[in-house]
Amino acid sequence: MSNNIQENIQENIQENIQENNSYCGFITIVGRPNVGKSTLMNHLIGQKVSITSRKPQTTQHIIHGINVLNNYQYIFVDTPGFQTKYINKLNKLLNESVINELKDIDVVLFVVEAGIFNLADEQVLNLLPKNKQLFLVINKIDKYKDKTLMSDFIHTITQKFKFNDIILLSAKQHYGIDEALEKISKVLPEGPFLYLDDQITNRNSSFLTSEIIREKLFRYLGQELPYSTAVIIDEFNDKEDVTKINGTILVDKQNQKGIVIGKME
Ligand SMILES: Nc1nc2c(ncn2[C@@H]2O[C@H](COP(=O)(O)OP(=O)(O)OP(=O)(O)O)[C@@H](O)[C@H]2O)c(=O)[nH]1
Ligand SMILES: [Mg+2]
């Protein structure tokens, strides 16, 4: 066999090995409340698993959203919005869960809203670990009209912290999502898939159902009430042709019942 043919075969084998290698990693999405973290995760995986609303601290439970593209498995981790404005027990717990989620991960997406970088954003910035792959994600660029100011905005943030890369997108309009996946794929560590190929989240149907109900409470009730409600799924019975679900919405006070379900005549 000539040297050339041998080299070709060697190259093919190398390529095959590389093609068959799998890459898998945890990508934690952090940011202050309301910047669009959950919307972003849903668009990155192409499915709705995390609930969203205009009110801050909609997300209260860590949830994984999983996407498989060829030999890459992305495990996104959606976290509650980190906030220090109002300190109560719930906020403390939510903040602790964010700090915890920044420990054993590979990549961090630090999400901000285009044109806004305030104290709350800075507080999250100060939590970011130095030894990870860090991406600055500037979301909601559809709302940012004066594009000439974007480089100044980016400079304001990057002079405070060194990021591996910057991603501009509009999660809601699904703009820039494929580019984001491409950039993240470059830093995913090599390793076996940790979830099954067709799994989209680590949470079960019962949890997802309770979250969908909670989302409606957040979207349709006033400013305060959603924060004093909770949802329990009492029965989740998935039969062949029908799924029977029984749930309970818990409220703090008796007089809040009427606001949620409507007053009895
Ligand atoms: N215009 C615009 N709105 C967006 C975009 N992404 C998200 N939103 C809106 O921003 C609001 C907050 O979105 P969420 O995804 O719930 O934000 P979050 O960061 O997960 O919020 P918390 O869980 O409360 O911390 C919702 O009303 C979204 O529809 C975007 O790209 N453009
Ligand atoms: Mg959220």
Image (cartoon, rainbow, N blue to C red):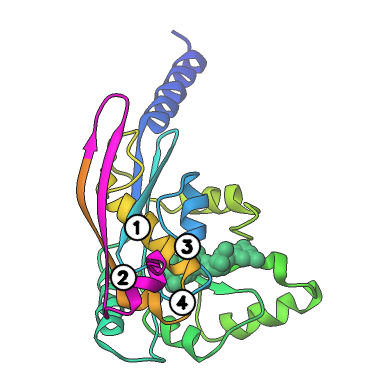
Give the residue furthest to the top. 1
Query: Residue 17's spot in the image, x, y percent?
Result: 37, 29
Q: Residue 58: name its quadrant.
A: bottom left
In this figure, which residue is indicated by the disc labeled 4?
Answer: 56
- Name which of mark 4 and mark 2 comes first in the sequence: 4
Q: CA distance from mark 4 to mark 1?
A: 15 Å
Can you say whether 257 is above or below 91 in the image? above
In this figure, which residue is indicated by the disc labeled 1?
Answer: 211
Query: Residue 32's spot in the image, x, y percent?
Result: 46, 78
| Mark 1 element type | helix
- Pick the quarter of the image with the C terminus: bottom left
In this figure, which residue is indicated by the disc labeled 3?
Answer: 52
Q: In the image, ligand 1 is in what quadrant?
A: bottom right
Query: Residue 144's spot in the image, x, y percent?
Result: 73, 72
| Mark 3 element type | loop
In front: label 4 or label 1: 1
Q: Inspect this view and state whether residue 201 appears.
A: yes
Q: Residues within 10 Å of mark 1 (few under 14, many from 20)?
A: many
In this figure, which residue is indicated by the disc labeled 2?
Answer: 102
